[in-house]
Amino acid sequence: MQRKALSPPASASGTYYQGREAGHRDGFEEGYFRGKQQAYAARSPFIPAVRDLHVLYVTSGKGYPYSPIDEAVFATLQGMVRQVTISDARQDVTACAADCKPDIMIVLDGMFLPPDHVDRVRSMGIPAAVWMTDDPYYADMAPGWVTRYDFVFTLERNCVAHYQNMGCPHVFYLPFAAFPGHYRPLQRSSAARRQVSFVGTAYPKRIEFFQPIMDRLMKYETLINGNWWEKLPGYAKYGSRIEMNKWMGPGETANVYNSAKIVINLHRAFDDQAINQNSFRIPAASPNPRTFEINACGTLQLCDEREDLASFYTPGVEIETYRTPAELLEKVDFYLANEAVRKDIALKALDRTFKEHTYGHRLDTMLSIIRP
């Protein structure tokens, strides 16, 4: 027997059709936006020339959260040089270098690699470079070993002079970037949609910033992920809106970024004495890796102001900034109410990230310096 489609009650038909049309319109606009994201991410891919080099890449040896950076660097290098051999700071790097005879050695972080291993590798005629991961927050940890390297790359602009004053011969500013293998727009929207999101550890200065506005921030259906949020006074009343003490891998983090309309980025404070080891009081001017990763997902980023941020993204055009808790709330209000403006900035940020701020761009710069 043929069945007829059910019709809405006559009294509700106007509301029914209005709701259906609004749903169709929202679905179309969301699909159109995600299609544009895919197009922006796919156009003009950066394809560096393949160098006739054998690189020994030494991972930090610290595991997560450094391992995703190791994965990004190693995977990117494989498409840029003739050969990559990977080792670990906790392994016998000297024996590995003697066996594989690389042209250069690149070390991530370097804190766990014994300085005498660096000396022995260099004695084989192999230039050694280190990419510092935690500047300036752990600047006190570096003096004992960083001078052993031929090349020092730091993600913090203000640390260049610091290492030069220690006697390091070649020091360069090279921030981290986005790895498209981890961070890029999703073709389909996430099942868990968010208005506003923040991912990060609850350092003391972050709690100090968020605490006065947390009640208002939660009215935007904000979700927070990260460690130590039990230190936030009254955290329990927010329930599942704060997912605590969970390290998220890059895939899960990218999904969070993709599922939100707005992602907040609040850098850690350089003068947070309870957490940092920065007795030199080196101020932080440079953007953190999260800056590039959020933008690579094609989501609007509200980022606290940093002195060197405008070297990478134009504020108000490719990224939005704030200085105070009140300004943050004001801009959340504005961009949630102005979808077209929000999406335009997000797309421009995505475009510039894939054109200028991937690990391919950074490693191309590094290799050009080490072996011009």
Image (tube, helix red, strand yellow):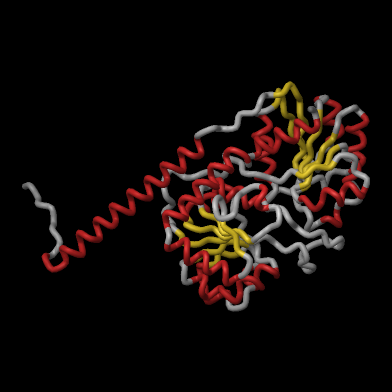
Q: Decide: is 100 above or below 34.
A: above
**Foreground: 167 or 242?**
167
Provide residue 31's location: percent of width, then percent of height. Answer: 37, 46
Q: For residue 94, what is the image quadrant?
A: top right
Q: Estimate the x, y position of residue 370 in percent, counting from the top left.
A: 80, 32
Extreme top residue here? 52
262 with respect to 128 (left or right): left
Q: Residue at x 28, y 57 (%)?
A: 22
Q: In the picture shown, does residue 352 fall above or below 127?
A: below
Pinpoint residue 114: horizontal percent, then vertical percent.
88, 44
- x then y, percent, for residue 151: 84, 38
- Whether residue 36 sits left or right of residue 270 in the image: it is left
- What residue is drawn where x is 86% and y is 52%? 162
**Residue 279 as seen in the image, left or right of residue 318:** right
Nearest to the observer: residue 211 or residue 304: 304
Left or right, 3 with respect to 66, comes to left
- 22 shown above or below 86: below
Which corner quadrant holds the C terminus? top right
Number of marks: 0
Q: Residue at x 63, y 73 (%)?
A: 232
Find the residue positioned furthest to the left: 1
Quarter of the image for residue 92 reads top right
